[in-house]
Every structure is written in structure tokens, then in C-alpha cells.
Image: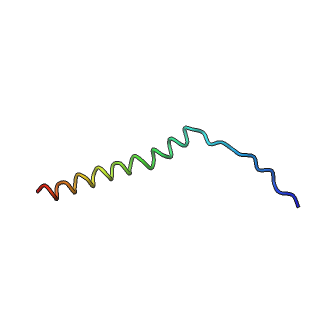
Amino acid sequence: MSTPDRTPTSTPMGLIVLAWALVTIPLLYGLVQTIRTASALFTG
């Protein structure tokens, strides 16, 4: 029984950057909104 030939493939750099941007941008937006809301609670 032979195993299939598995050659490594490369992911285009643009796709990696796009994927990270899709995760990072909303995360940063949520973090900024949370900090703004929390600071309003603590500063009065």
C-alpha cells in the first residue's frame, strides 16, 4: 500500500495579510471601544 505524494504548497503572502487584517481590524476596533467605554465609567 503506497501513500499519496504530498508535496508542500505555499500560501500567497497577500492571502495571509488579508486573513490577518480580517481578524486584527475588528479586534482593534472592539478593543478601542471597550477602553473608551470603560474609561467613561471610571472617570465619571
**Residue most extreme to the bottom:** 1
Q: Is residue 3 left or right of residue 16?
A: right
Residue 42: horizontal and vertical position, in percent?
16, 58
Q: Is residue 5 left or right of residue 22?
A: right
Q: Quadrant of the C terminus?
A: bottom left
Q: Residue at x 55, y 42 (%)?
A: 15
**Residue most extreme to the right:** 1
Q: Quadrant of the N terminus?
A: bottom right
Q: Residue at x 42, y 47 (%)?
A: 24
| Residue 43 in the image: above or below residue 16 | below
Q: Residue at x 22, y 57 (%)?
A: 38
Residue 43: horizontal and vertical position, in percent?
13, 55
Residue 27: horizontal and vertical position, in percent?
38, 51
- Seen from the viewer's position, the closer of residues 44 and 26 is 44
Total labels: the figure holds 0
**Residue most extreme to the front:** 42
Q: Residue at x 81, y 54 (%)?
A: 4
Coloring applied to the structure: rainbow
